[in-house]
């Protein structure tokens, strides 16, 4: 039994080789983080405030009253964290740039000390033979732009283009890919309709206009970067999961179809088909965004890749939903159902419905109530979650879906947005009092999988022999 799979007595020798050989030799294995969740140093070296700094200061906004002011102190511990990734044998790292760290006001002057941090980060990754995957926007809008209307204001899309061009000019030729946005649905709906994420607003009309303007900024950025001669693969990252009807009643099936339209088809149709789904536009009525034909041509710029973040499915119905504790389903500490088959289902559906570019699973992982005991975290639930989802991904690939990589969320326990520090997603345990990093058993499991793949127990690319 290996350290990374505590509590499972039926460990079969060769399991890692069996799993690894289901993936092509060029498949990418990585870990992911985001700037506000790990960096800390929120008021240091010229960084400006973001909407999350302001949101965290509101009483009751964050469940434990915390903020990302210190987070994992990655800003000062970057070398330690890069060494950790290297020691685990993980070949790729997805990170985001903090817009207010490199451009404090979201317009105008650039902050050289902020850019120096990301220059050193990319250099450090490349020195360790770790491929950098860059995300431009992971929710931390400069607060000064929010004062001017934030993402409701189309001008923010133009400011995003300026930001994207400058980051790409400085870093783009040394990173493996550039994603414009992470999970625009979250920014729009949780931030502007539900009001539980920054900036904490509550208007469906506003949320849908924000969703459109985010997609518009993505398309404008792709146009500008390609005009600048950027050859780095460009894409976007969406959060998705199957929407299942709670019952087979016509009402529940219709509700599930609508929810699918609001969460999946709204973004996929716009990006890949150049239109919003007609049934959703009709449902929204006066809350539908203001859109021009030119907007849709801009949004549907060709993608070099599409990132998918998968955690669970959703069950939709018109009746009162069952409480998680009463439905008998296996769940994580977030209350999310553990449903690996949903990843296969989602990928096959996307493959059937859309003209897809290559895909990457940019986030997949789970929060559990991890306990540090005698210097070790025996997170067997997370090991099981990861194993089952990696196998589900292999099922989809073997049925024809072009997926090129998989990133675990997250490298580190971190600031989990509205939940503060109460939820732990990391494969590395962080003692927030001391900032000590302790790889969990799940990190050791992932280390073994990456090693098996690296050592050649893999399926070869099309046309080559299978080992």
Image: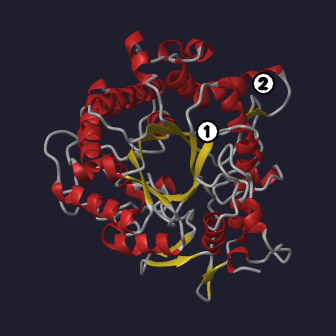
The residue lying at 48 percent from left, 35 percent from top is 304
Return the mark for residue 355. none
The C terminus is located in which quarter? bottom right
Assign a secondary structure to mark 2: helix
Name the quarter where the N terminus is drawn.
bottom right
Q: Dot 2: few (<14), some (14–19), or many (≥20) neighbours within 10 Å? A: some
Sequence-first tag of 2 and 1: 1
Name the residue nearer the viewer: 295 or 119.
119
The percent coordinates of residue 113 (x first, y second) are 18, 60
Image coordinates for residue 135, horizontal then vertical, percent: 40, 47
Residue 25, image x and y in percent? 62, 55
Residue placed under numbered mark 1 in the picture? 240
Callout 1 secondary element: loop
- The answer to which quarter of the image holds residue 384 is bottom right
Contact between marks 2 and 1 (CB within 8 A): the answer is no
Assess disc 1: are there few (<14), some (14-19) or many (≥20) residues with their C-alpha within 10 Å of its C-alpha: many
- Position of 109 with respect to 140 (left or right) is left
Asked whether, in this view, residue 179 is left or right of residue 254, the answer is left
Circle 2 residue:
253
Q: Nearer the viewer, residue 194 or 245?
A: 245
Q: Is residue 411 visible?
A: yes
Q: Residue at x 47, y 71 (%)?
A: 86
Q: Is residue 119 above or below residue 273?
A: below
Determine whether, in the image, residue 120 is placed left or right of residue 452.
Answer: left
Res. 342 in view: no
Q: Position of residue 130 (x, y in %)?
A: 45, 63
CA gap between label 2 and label 1 equals 18 Å
Q: Is residue 390 above or below residue 80?
A: above
């Amino acid at each position: 039994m290996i350290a990374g799979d505590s509590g499972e007595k039926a460990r079969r020798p060769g399991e890692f080789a069996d799993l690894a050989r289901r993936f092509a030799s060029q498949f990418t294995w990585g870990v992911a983080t985001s700037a506000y969740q790990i960096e800390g140093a929120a008021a240091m070296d010229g960084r400006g405030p973001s909407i999350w700094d302001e949101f965290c200061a509101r009483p009751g906004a964050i469940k434990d009253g915390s903020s990302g002011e210190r987070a994992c102190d990655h800003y000062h511990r970057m070398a330690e964290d890069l060494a950790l990734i290297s020691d685990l044998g993980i070949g790729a790292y997805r990170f985001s740039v903090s817009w207010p760290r490199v451009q404090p006001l979201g317009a105008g002057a650039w902050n050289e000390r902020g850019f120096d941090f990301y220059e050193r980060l990319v250099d450090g990754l490349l020195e360790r033979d770790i491929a950098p995957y860059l995300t431009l926007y992971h929710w931390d809008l400069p607060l000064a732009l929010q004062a001017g209307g934030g993402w409701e204001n189309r001008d923010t899309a133009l400011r995003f283009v300026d930001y994207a061009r400058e980051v790409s000019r400085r870093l783009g030729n040394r990173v493996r890919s550039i994603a414009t946005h992470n999970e625009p649905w979250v920014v729009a709906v949780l931030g502007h309709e539900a009001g539980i994420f920054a900036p904490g607003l509550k208007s469906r009309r506003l949320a849908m206009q924000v969703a459109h303007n985010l997609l518009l900024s993505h398309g404008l950025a792709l146009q500008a970067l390609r005009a600048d001669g950027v050859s780095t693969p460009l894409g976007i990252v969406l959060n998705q999961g199957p929407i299942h009807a709670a019952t087979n009643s016509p009402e529940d099936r219709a509700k599930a179809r609508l929810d699918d339209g609001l969460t999946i088809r709204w973004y996929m149709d716009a990006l890949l088909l150049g239109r919003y789904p007609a049934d959703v536009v009709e449902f929204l009525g006066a809350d539908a965004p203001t859109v021009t034909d030119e907007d849709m041509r801009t949004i549907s710029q060709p993608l070099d890749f599409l990132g998918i973040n998968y955690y669970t499915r959703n069950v939709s119905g018109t009746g009162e939903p069952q409480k998680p504790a009463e439905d008998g389903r296996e769940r994580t500490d977030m209350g999310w159902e553990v449903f690996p088959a949903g990843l296969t289902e989602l990928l096959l559906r996307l493959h059937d419905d859309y003209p897809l570019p290559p895909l990457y699973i940019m986030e997949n992982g789970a929060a559990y109530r991890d306990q540090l005991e005698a210097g070790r975290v025996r997170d067997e639930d997370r090991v099981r979650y990861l194993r089952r989802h990696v196998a589900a991904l292999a099922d989809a690939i073997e049925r024809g879906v072009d997926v090129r990589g998989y990133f675990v969320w997250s490298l580190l326990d971190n600031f989990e947005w509205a939940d503060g520090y109460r939820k732990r997603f990391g494969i590395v345990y962080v003692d927030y009092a001391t900032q000590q990093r302790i790889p969990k058993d799940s990190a050791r499991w992932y280390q073994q999988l990456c090693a098996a793949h690296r050592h050649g127990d893999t399926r070869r690319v099309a046309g080559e022999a299978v080992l």
